[in-house]
Image (spheres, grey):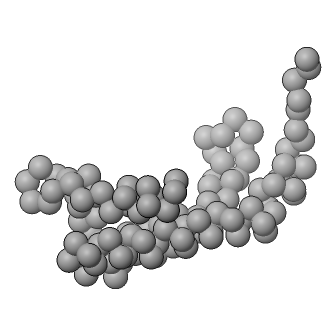
Amino acid sequence: MKGFKVDKEWMERNVLSNPTVQSALNAKARRIAPIVKRIALKEGDRHYAESVRVMQGRRPGTKSPTHLRRPYARVIIGDEHADAKEYGDGRIYPKKGYLRRAIAEAGG
């Protein structure tokens, strides 16, 4: 069987710039964000919950061998101690795993 080769312009036009693909990525992030907020509020971390937002954009594509600029949508936490609260720092913040728990609850 021969390898299937996709034209870079076709991929950009039909997949990466497709509004359906971008809206699906955005919908998943928007589905996870309120779950993160609810879990944080349930744990009593109001500052963390208020700092949750969804951001979308395009990756630069500089590390990709094809240099394709792929779209993304991600849940961003504005809390300055978000990393320590998510993964634990061993001193002040125990491992909470708000994002991990939200993704598991949303179904991947």
Left or right position of 58 against 75 = right
Residue 75: x, y in percent? 47, 67
Relative to 13, residue 75 above or below: below
Please give the name of the residue rendered at 66% of the width and 40% of the height, measured from the top-left corner: 64
Where residue 69 appears, as percent x and y from the top left, is 70, 53
Residue pictured at 90% horizontal, 49% vertical:
10
Residue 58 in view, yes or no: no
Closest to the observer, 58 or 91 = 91
In the displayed structure, 68 sits above or below 19; it is above
Relative to 14, say whether 67 is above or below.
above
Along the horizontal axis of the image, is 46 left or right of 15? Answer: left
Q: In which quarter of the image is residue 105?
A: bottom left
Q: Which of 17 and 88 is in front in this view?
A: 88
Q: Quadrant of residue 46?
A: bottom left
> In the rendered image, is residue 28 in sight?
yes
**In the image, residue 58 above or below residue 46:** above
Name the side, left or right, on which 10 lies relative to 89.
Answer: right
Q: Residue furthest top?
A: 1
Residue 66 picture location, percent across and down: 74, 39
The N terminus appears in which quarter of the rendering?
top right
Kindly identify the residue that appears in the image at 55 percent across and 73 percent down.
Answer: 30
Q: Position of residue 101 (x, y in %)?
A: 37, 58
Q: Which residue is drawn at 26% across and 52% down?
A: 87
Total labels drawn:
0
